[in-house]
Amino acid sequence: MQILVTGGAGYIGSHMVVSLLEGGHQVAVLDNYANSSADILKQVEEITGKKCPAYEADVTDAGQLDALMAEIRPDSVFHFAGRKSVAESVERPDFYHQQNVVGTQNLLSAMAKCGCNQIIFSSSATVYGAPEKLPLTETHRVSPFNPYGVSKLAAENAITRWTDAAPERRAVLLRYFNPVGAHISGKIGENPKGRPNNLFPFIVQVAAGLRAELEIYGDDYETPDGTGVRDYIHITDLVEGHIAALAYAQNHKGSEIFNLGTGKGYSVCDVVHAFEAATGIKVPYQIKDRRAGDIATCYADAAKAESQLGWVAKLGLEQMCRDGWRWQENQSGDAQK
Ligand code: WQD
């Protein structure tokens, strides 16, 4: 199939491009490189031995998008382009609406104009807000409490309205829990610009000596060891979930939502200890106050994806730590060249 991957130079997008190329698809990448680099696509070519056309473009530019879609004429679109920092979204809610909602609306409009009827969308468990019942199923009420989560839910709703408007249209909306780790080759991974907001890249940077110590945001939650519990999922498993979603979309019209998580929750201390065991590297930390907006526990009920997509996460926390560290070691090695 001819597939367009928006945000294809980003952390999740680049791993998706590798998998699609290895699966024999023709892939085109669209990215504005605001939170990524075109160099990543050279690593994708090294991994796959295949080159794919890349277009520097912004989904908020409707005219540019219409022209590109008319040129590429994809059979399916994987939509990753967007901003994903909760903290940044609190400071810049309008920017998040523009990037994540208007950008998605522009994409849907461009797809309609060029006759593309299929989209796989990168959504987030943040749309659920504070869990009322765990594990989280896809029918749990949605109540996002930050502009990032609000923008993701609004984009989901825009896509659902788009498929409701024409019978041939298909959409799979994938709600990610906490994607971590890196491709087994160590050539691509998560490379946040500036101070990492998320736990896993921060641990990796402490281990690499780039940060002095990890700050653990609160140890007084109602959890086994008092630190926050999350559902960490290996990026490779996450990408496999998208491949299963692509197959599902061939036989199912309309929009369908799936959680992509492991169904297991690990605390911050669990992750620190797993990382130390997997790498042999001590991760110094200090307990700090809770981070505003954080919840105690969040993990998926992944039964629907297992029964309807035939997908289940296979890789454990140790593999996430080992693969994430290999990527950082390669990064550090490159930095010293
Ligand atoms: C995990 C745990 C923190 C950093 C966010 C987004 C979500 C998704 C994943 C996009 C929490 C603790 C963290 C640190 C810490 N992104 N922590 N010290 O908040 O679960 O989810 O990223 O879709 O939408 O909301 O992930 O990695 O920031 O935090 O103690 O330096 O680690 O308190 O318990 P989160 P996270």
Image: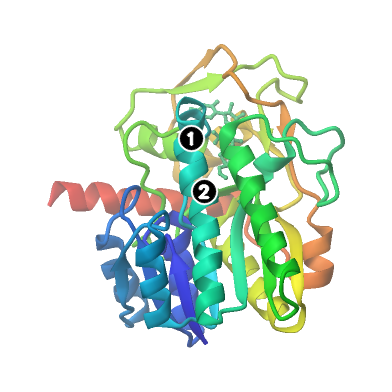
Kind of residue at disc 2: Asn
Q: What residue is shown at x 32% (from left), y 38% (from top)?
A: 208
Q: What residue is shown at x 64% (from left), y 47% (from top)?
A: 154
Residue 170, image x and y in percent? Answer: 69, 74
Q: How is the image coloured?
A: rainbow
Residue at numbered disc 2: 100
User: Would you place residue 74 above or below residue 311 in this image?
Assistant: below
Residue 217, image x and y in percent? Answer: 56, 20
Residue 269, picture quadrant: top right
User: Would you place residue 61 above or below residue 50 in this image?
Assistant: above
Q: What residue is shown at x 59% (from left), y 43% (from top)?
A: 151
Q: What residue is shown at x 55% (from left), y 49% (from top)?
A: 101
Residue at numbered disc 1: 94
Disc with the residue nearer the chain's start (2 vs 1) = 1
Q: Nearer the viewer, residue 155 or 229?
A: 155
Residue 58, image x and y in percent? Answer: 36, 57
Q: Is mark 2 within 8 Å of ligand 1?
A: no
Report the Cα–Cα distance between label 2 and label 1.
10 Å
Badge 2 density bin: few <14, some 14–19, many ≥20, Cα 10 Å:
many
Q: Nearer the viewer, residue 129 or 311?
A: 129
Is residue 159 visible in the rendered image? The answer is yes
Q: Nearer the viewer, residue 68 or 304?
A: 68
Residue 76, image x and y in percent? Answer: 55, 77
Q: Nearer the viewer, residue 334 or 157?
A: 157
Kind of residue at disc 1: Asp
The answer to whether 116 appears left or right of 88 in the picture is: right
